[in-house]
Image: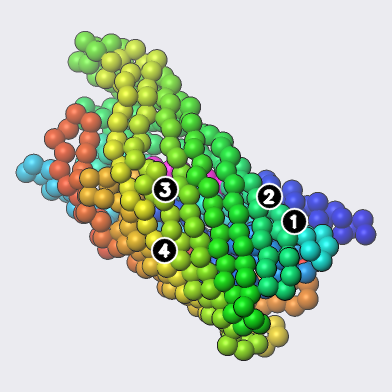
Amino acid sequence: MKVKNKLIAMGVLCALSVPQLAGAEGFAINEWSAEGVAMGGARMFAEGDAANVAYNPASITKVDGEAFKASLTYISPHGEYDLYKENFHENGNNRVHFGFAPGSYYVKKINDKDWFGIGAFSRFAMVSEFERNSAVSTNAFLSRLNGVSVTPVFAHKFDDKWSAAVGAEVNYVGLTMEKNTVFGSPTHTKGESYALGWNAAANYAFDDKNEIGVVYRSRIKHSMEADFNAYGVPSSMGILGNTGDLSGDAYGEVTLPESWHIGYSHKFNDRTRVELNAVRTGWDTYKNLDIMVSGTGNAIFDTMHNSAKNWEDGWRYAIGIEHKLSDKYTVMAGYAYDESSIPYDGGDFMVPTGNRRTYSIGARYNDEKQTVALALGWMDVGDLRFAFREEGGPGGHAHTHDSFTKIIGISYQRNF
């Protein structure tokens, strides 16, 4: 019993403390487990899966006993761009980089009606990087948003048909932005913020083969304080104040969007199941990225830096299928389509993504005590055309193309 309690305590600790770093030329993250990657994110009704904390808290009632799960997803984006401004044209590509989206989950069955779960995973994150001496560097040559959500949830099973869950969300974001000014000075902005949100979910089983569910996640408003630095400000800018290497403070606000997840599961038989999933994300909350800089002593920096976004609400559609080859081995496949929410006048090189199509496969081994899963995915990121804006510059337009992302996911679950 003491060993078991230590393992449980370790699981809870890991769920709260695993460092989160996610990287992709996107914003919303759906890669929360290897099985979820394999099924295109259509993973709301999995049997006995602790990652249900992320995909559908109402389904943690499908976990018998206790379970701890750890997952890691490798994400590597690639892409090219064309930039046009006045009589100038530049063709280039993003710097090849990769990121990881870890997740950790713990679920405990309290009694025949009640369950508790907690997870730590990334819901919003991105990283994009370009050459520091490229023309796009005045827009952004490095943009990184690291995010983690810690979500304790409580689920109740009313009867054989209905289950529901409610939970809180502690959301952390760490933002790093680097770009060049039009007169050649690189700037660096770095800050972090914590904010609170909540979620709710419900499942209804029509019979042994058909089930529907819905998950709601609230908006989360961040108010971020950051450090600002500018390097090598030329002496010709002395008329506006300090020159050389400058430092100051930055402040900004951003509201991460609410989302609705709707799913349907159908079991053809005891071995084969298909799931359909749709997600509506309220990206219309991302209207501006305004950062107020103060304390540098130079008027060109000590001002409000406005960047209109005006993103639109978007849908994500996914279909996933899993088939049991035997009691221990399962194969999975999935497809997902993400609408781009970025309008022509709201695009930039921070998140240069169009309509995305993801194709994935995976396999899982399980016995009574443990589960191991591996998934491979390939995302066609899609083209995006947008207005190129830079402070104090002439502007122009840009086109990102031939973009794709490689995805590898691995998960391990221990049942108690």
- Give the residue drawn at x 27%, y 20%: 300
User: Could you say where residue 326 lies in the image, as x and y percent from the top left?
Assistant: 67, 88
Label 2 to label 3: alpha-carbon separation: 27 Å
Query: Which one is earlier in the sequence, the residue at label 1 or at label 3?
Result: 1
Q: Residue furthest left?
A: 87
Query: Which one is earlier in the sequence, the residue at label 4 or at label 2?
Result: 2
Callout 4: few (<14), some (14-19), or many (20+) C-alpha neighbours within 10 Å?
Answer: some
Query: Which one is earlier in the sequence, the residue at label 3 or at label 4?
Result: 3
Front disc: 2 or 3: 2
At label 4, the amino acid type is Arg
User: Could you say where residue 70 lies in the image, as x and y percent from the top left?
Assistant: 66, 60
Q: Mark 3 sits on what residue?
A: 127
Q: What colour scheme has been applied to the protein in the rendered image?
A: rainbow
CB-based contact (under 8 Å), mark 4 and mark 2: no
Query: Which one is earlier in the sequence, the residue at label 4 or at label 1?
Result: 1
At label 1, the amino acid type is Phe
Q: Mark 4 sits on what residue?
A: 316
Callout 2: few (<14), some (14-19), or many (20+) C-alpha neighbours within 10 Å?
Answer: many
**Dot 3: element:** strand
> Is residue 10 visible to us here?
yes
Label 3 to label 4: alpha-carbon separation: 21 Å
**Dot 1: element:** strand
Numbered mark located on residue 116 in the image: 1
- Give the residue drawn at x 49%, y 69%: 277
Instruction: Give the magenta range.
Output: 143-148
